[in-house]
Image (cartoon, rainbow, N blue to C red):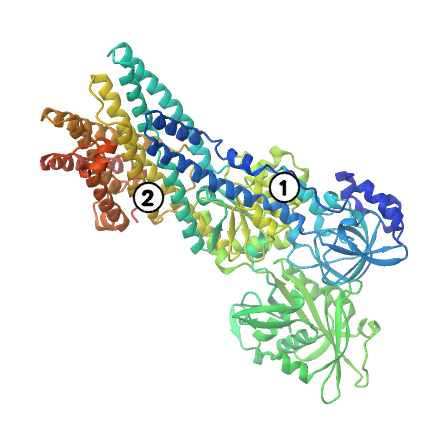
Amino acid sequence: MKKTTSTERNLWHTLTQDETCAALNCNEQGLSSQEAQQRLAKYGFNKLTSVGKRGVFKRFISQFHNVLVYVLLAAAGVTAAIGHWTDSGVIICVVVINALIGFIQEGKAEKALDAIRNMLTPTATVYRDGHYFTVPAEQLVPGDVVSLESGDKVPADLRLLQVKNLRVDESMLTGESLPVEKNIATTDSAAPLGDRFCLAYAGTLITYGTAGGLVINTGDNTEIGRISTLLRTVSNLTTPLLRQIAGFSTWLTVAILVVASATFAYGWYFQHSSVTDLFMSVVGLAVAAIPEGLPAVMTITLAMGVQRMAKRKAIVRRLPAVEALGSVTVICSDKTGTLTCNEMTAKSVFVNNTLFTVSGVGYEPIGDFKIEEKSTDVSTQPALHELLRAAALCNNARLEQQAGNWLVHGDPTEAALITLAHKASINTDLLNHALPRTDTLPFESEHRYMATLHHDHSGEAFMFVKGAPERVLAMCAWQRLAGKDQPLDNGHWQQIMMQMASNGQRLLAIAVKTLPATQKHLTFGDADNGLTLLGIIGMIDPPRAEAVNAVRKCQNAGIRVKMITGDHTVTASAIATQINIGDGSVLSGERVDRMTDSELTIALRTVDVFARTSPENKLRLVSALQADGHTVAMTGDGVNDAPALKRADVGISMGKKGTEVAKESSEIVLADDNFASIAAAVEEGRGIYDNLKKSIIFILPTGAGEAFIIIAAIIMGEILPITAVQILWVNMITAVTLSLTLAFEPPERNIMSRPPRKPNEPLLSKFLVWRIVFVAFIMLMGTFGLFLWEQSRGASIEQARTVTVNTLVLFEIFYVFNSRYLHHSVLNIQGLFGNQLIWLAVFVLLDLQMAFTYWPPMQVLFGTAAIDGLAWQMIIAVASSVFILVEIEKFFMRLFTPRASTENSKK
């Protein structure tokens, strides 16, 4: 396919119709079939390029390309080498399950491009050889003339040739909350996408009117094709947790190799041990150091997070995103539908020299009229009542209630006026019966107003007009004040309009004119002059009430909220002010385009509101924030949001009003399209990370303790107190039981009062490393001591090793209670009994240990033997020491580190 340069594509809106035809070597009569075939061979089909995908096998194998997986496979190889195929099989199963999860999720993500390709309309009405034909849209070529009408999806990028009351829903490309009125006039070369009124773009929807247009771009050269190409070039980023795990795995691999080599060398050169004994020791050391159960614990913990987030209206598509959302430092939010309701609402009315404010949000007809914040009865305000009646009569919209929801039939702006009338207890059905309509002048871009003719049952005729204030004011000679018509004070009304517009409201003027009772039809001449202005209505897509609190909650949590919208600068600024985003500064997409990367980075540190942004702007803003060290969450619902959603650390799309492209490009889908659900999901994400950290700090001391035991045995020239297969038993059985209970810990009370963790923060902080070493040392001393004590009593090596294993398991049983709170004491009812699953896991684990110790098949498999009551008394006494010593350590940590007492408060 022949490519169109960005310069050519961006200048079509500056060309007149004749200049466009000349550039495409065609005319407004369209092409001949022969010429169309020749151009089809030159430009290619009007469809988006399909990218060759990796085969199923390659996609599956790629899931194993991970350092942690290599470590686990090495562990499987080690256990297989020593002949323990069952243990090897368990580890391999864990690896395969993790690979299958990644394989399935990646397959879902690849649907994003498919969703874009399916957005192009399948057929088009084209004018060729002097006749209109319906042809497959993929056969359109530049130079074709196509016909459009209400309900059509635009089949290619078009230069409009003629329009009749044309309105196009371009929200998927621009984020504009209302359909755009189109015309045929050229626009400035710097006009953003949403202001190129003489162009219609592929994939957008005709909501009103008719048009004819000249095809200027097809396939990948269209705006939607450009986004598709952009989406293909954007690579997914790994989440903070995956980056931390990768770093930890690399560090762990190196540590295992170094320590194992040093241990082998020490035993060979200093203890002169046999190669066989050293090999078994190194095998045991490696198996001890590898946390085999950690991937399973991580996967199940994240899966539990998915369930909890779903209850809070956040549907997770990619498992690691569960935790990643808890680490974000910046949320880039779309405006329309996320921070706002995406439902036009009349918020102010100026009539009879009085400004009324109106409460209520959306199309639900519930709300009050207020004067200076005091409610007023509409029945005592005849001028207001008259204005609302006129707005309801000069109207084609209808509201309908279904299953508790209010549905709009017609234009959103007109629906807002019907809702306003209902709030004043005006029955629109009775009103239309009392004043039936006899004629209409429909809204046209050329005239910028709508007029309707009504006759009451006494024969009087009235013309009601609504439209753009500057146009309607030019048609008015009078204004109604206290029930009487007075000469229009144009300057006064201009001041009122400026005041209302400064709040980001879109204004409509309402006027009336009495006509002869015998007049049954309207002409434009009837409306050109002599009207009486009744008042001005201001409306806006208002902020969600819960969004204000959610934004504040995020800001208190140290998360910066930025608004990135395709809407106008004034509207964006007004909404941002109401939601307390930013300091009033707004950057337009045009200014962003002119900035260098360094200038943009500096601007992003102070500016939080961006308006009239393009897909490239959004992608560049997200990338710049990431380059500045931020973890970024991006919300969106349109095709224009897809590249930025894919690039962000966490992409969040809208479930109700979002396009399939946006959903497939995101990691999380909001079931209710509500920003408040993002704040709730961030809270859950932080809780999940805390629980993962607790699981890790619980699992790793055991492995470290086991490794210390083996190293101590080699240094002292003792026989190994624990074998590799016994180590695997301890690691897997405690991970599956005890550590999983920590996944069910609820978020801590102050979790949204602390700042986000740093993106480059290691998985193991200095404090966590200290705790791991401290607990591992306790386990080493207690376990190795009991092993030597048991041997001194004349016990067999099997009995001594059985004591070692049971001591390690009981150490973990006591330590899991310590792990519930990292800093605070668990010596209270909530700390000891707040998570009942721990007690269930303890009883299950004790049953398993009884089988491990006394059941003959287990004794044969693991090399264990029965032990007596005195051994159990010593095991319990020694193992309980970890609980006491860690609680003492917490006390001194809180005493000498005040920060610890505030970072993790009691639940």
Q: Which mark is residue 196?
A: none
- Above or below — where is 678 with respect to 290? below
**Position of residue 35 measured from the top left corner of the image (x, y, whole percent):** 88, 46
- Above or below — where is 579 with respect to 791? below
How far apart, in angstroms, are the residues tagged by discs 1 and 2? 38 Å
SS under mark 1 = helix
Amino acid found under the numbered disc labelled 1? Leu
In primary-sequence order, the first of circles 1 and 2 is 1
SS under mark 2 = helix
Q: Which mark is residue 231?
A: 1
Residue named by callout 2: 740
**Position of residue 716 measured from the top left corner of the image (x, y, whole percent):** 20, 17
Front residue of 51 and 678: 51
**Position of residue 569 measured from the top left corner of the image (x, y, whole percent):** 64, 51
Amino acid found under the numbered disc labelled 2? Leu
Picture quadrant where residue 438 is located? bottom right
